[in-house]
Image (cartoon, rainbow, N blue to C red):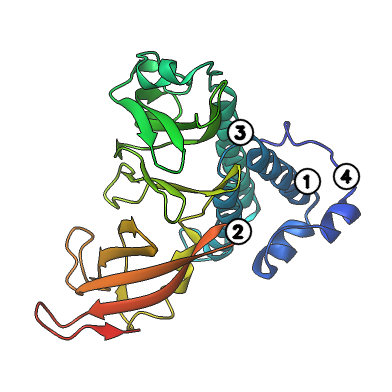
Amino acid sequence: MLLASVAMTAPLSAQAQTCSMPAALAERVCADADLARLDAQLVATEKRVEAATSRPATWAVRARQFREDLATQTDGEDKPLGREALIDQIQSRIAELENEIVRAKGIAAVRDANSVATGSKCLSAWLSMNCIVPMSGVLRDGDGTKIVWQFQSGASEADGGATGVLLWDASKPGAPKLIGWTFEGVMMEAPRYNAESKLLWVPGRMVGTGDHNADILYQKRGDRWVEIDMGGWNAALEGRLPKGLGVWHGVDYSFTGDAMGAETDLWKDADANCCATGGRANLEFAIEGDALKLTGISAQTEGPGSEWKDY
């Protein structure tokens, strides 16, 4: 049993009333004293992550997705996860969140833009193993916006090899203000700023055969930068694509002028992960609050040269 670190945050009756798990998990988690306490610890840690990091919208979506996934997971006999498995899953999630807080605390204070744009010292402690700065630079625009950025390449004990990016706003005199960061990528591209839509975008990909997105996106609203979640829109795909087709890998985003979209291959249910045969799709987005919202899909599903249809 790995419950020694679980804080006695509240009586079970109080925790059951505020249990964060969906209905499919409520009876198994919320009515169990140890699991209910773990649930309370999970919620508290999620709130700390949202407060400490530069990606509160993304972490809020991931909190919901974790619970949805946990509710549908099964064991080796295709049965719902048992008590011990649920404990392991929730504790592992809490440990991942604690690592994100460590990442946030390890970012160094920056005194001037030049130290970022031309410096060779890694300004975060997370990728501490053989960390180098392969690229850094400055983004300027006619509206007075000035962004300084740094890429880092190295490794951490928790994640292994990775590439990170850090962004600061140096538009005003004084020390640059930290906008955001990520250490989830293995391949990252230089940041891009669209003055028309006020979007600051860093394209990137994660390691693995899924080639998933590691992009980060921020929008300037007045004097503050708002992080835009780029992952929650995927849930809307299932009900809109033709039956038997899906998007299994990362997508190729584009943010030009007022247009926000992405291109992607489509996989059939019987396809191998490497090789999509279901055609192509163009996706259209709008920003709603602090998230990308899927607003349109057009797809070519019958081979090159076939008609594109809206879904």
Above or below: residue 111 compared with residue 1:
above
Q: In the rendered structure, find residue 98 and report the number of the disc placed on it.
A: 3
Are dots 4 and 3 in contact, CB under 8 Å? Answer: no
Circle nearer the N terminus (4, 3): 4
- For label 2, the residue is 64
Give how far apart the Cα atoms at labels 3 and 1 are: 17 Å
Which is more N-terminal, label 2 or label 4? 4
Q: CA distance from mark 1 to mark 4?
A: 8 Å
Q: For the C terminus, which image quadrant?
A: bottom left
Which one is nearer the viewer's eye here, 83 or 144? 144
Q: Give me the C-alpha separation between circle 4 and circle 3.
A: 21 Å
Name the residue located 60 percent from the left edge and 47 percent from the top edge: 222
Q: Residue at x 42, y 29 (%)?
A: 148
Left or right of 97 on screen, residue 243: left
In this view of the protein, which residue sits in the foreground, 54 or 279? 54
Kind of residue at badge 2:
Arg
Classify residue 303 by image quadrant.
Answer: bottom left
| Disc 1 secondary structure class | helix
Q: Nearer the viewer, mark 4 or mark 3?
A: 3
The three-letter amino acid code for the residue at tag 4 is Ala
**Which mark, residue 124?**
none
Q: Quadrant of the N terminus?
A: top right
- Rendering quarter of residue 196: bottom left
Residue 37's tag is 1
Question: What SS does tag 2 mark?
Answer: helix
